[in-house]
Amino acid sequence: EASVKQLFLENRLSAELTAFFIDGRDLIYTDYTIKKNMNMGSFTNKGIEVELGYQVLKNLHFDVNYTFLHTSKPLPVAPKHKFYAGVTYNPSRFSFDLNVQTIADLYTNVDMRDPSNNVKEDHYTVLNAKAAYRFGDLNKGLKLFVKGENLTATRYSINYGYPMPKAIFMGGI
């Protein structure tokens, strides 16, 4: 892996580019159509990741990230394209986060014996949000939060036969 990062506009804008190469072998994965662990054999992954962050105001930050992954053979849970965009707003003791993530060309199941059985999730997009309030000082306080994930109730799977939940909400301290 090799990366380069550069700061601009008095460190308010950051840009990072990463290139990676993985030479792997003997990865164990589960073939969900036959419910059996299998050995993937040898494979290579290579790709790039681009990340930008911009501090618009003292309490407002945007960030985006894109990853492209090329695999020598279909690999489960390894999307070809991944895009993320988020905004964070921190007025005083509050913080608000909103982000969207898109995944494309994701294999949810791989059958090395018969590639025609491979199951592919074309693409999906999820929207997430979080609101929090901090009690006490920055390092020793408590944070009360509520958050929602997959707010658009998108139907998708990461692993074949195991659909992800629709919109979920949670809170905590």
Image (cartoon, grey):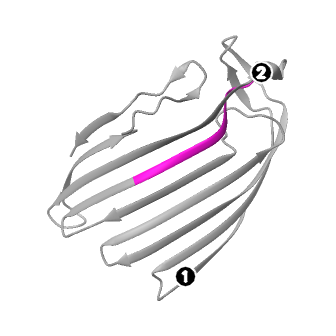
**Above or below: residue 70 compared with residue 87:** above
Q: Is residue 64 left or right of residue 118?
A: left
For mark 2, give the secondary structure: loop
Spot occupied by residue 10 in the image (x, y as percentages of width and height): 47, 89
Question: Which image quadrant: the N terminus?
Answer: bottom right
Q: Nearer the viewer, residue 25 or 47?
A: 47
Q: Is residue 148 left or right of residue 34?
A: left
Checking the image for residue 119, the label placed there is none
Query: Which residue is found at the position 73% from the left and 34% from the top?
Result: 75
Mark 1 or mark 2, which has the lower sequence index?
A: 1
**Above or below: residue 159 compared with residue 103:** above
Q: Main secondary structure of the magenta part?
A: strand
Range drawn in magenta: 99-110
Spot occupied by residue 108 in the image (x, y as percentages of width and height): 64, 28
For mark 1, give the secondary structure: strand
136 drawn magenta: no
Q: Is residue 172 left or right of residue 70?
A: left
Q: Which residue is mark 2?
A: 111
Spot occupied by residue 106 in the image (x, y as percentages of width and height): 66, 36
**Above or below: residue 42 compared with residue 157:** below
Residue furthest top in the image: 34
Mark 1: amino acid: Leu
Query: Which residue is found at the position 18% from the left and 65% from the top?
Result: 93
Q: CA distance from mark 1 to mark 2?
A: 44 Å
Residue furthest bottom in the image: 10
Mark 2: amino acid: Asp
Query: Which residue is found at the position 37% from the left and 40% from the top?
Result: 149
108 drawn magenta: yes
Spot occupied by residue 78 in the image (x, y as percentages of width and height): 67, 40
Q: Which residue is mark 1?
A: 7
Looking at the rendering, which quadrant does residue 95 occupy?
Answer: bottom left
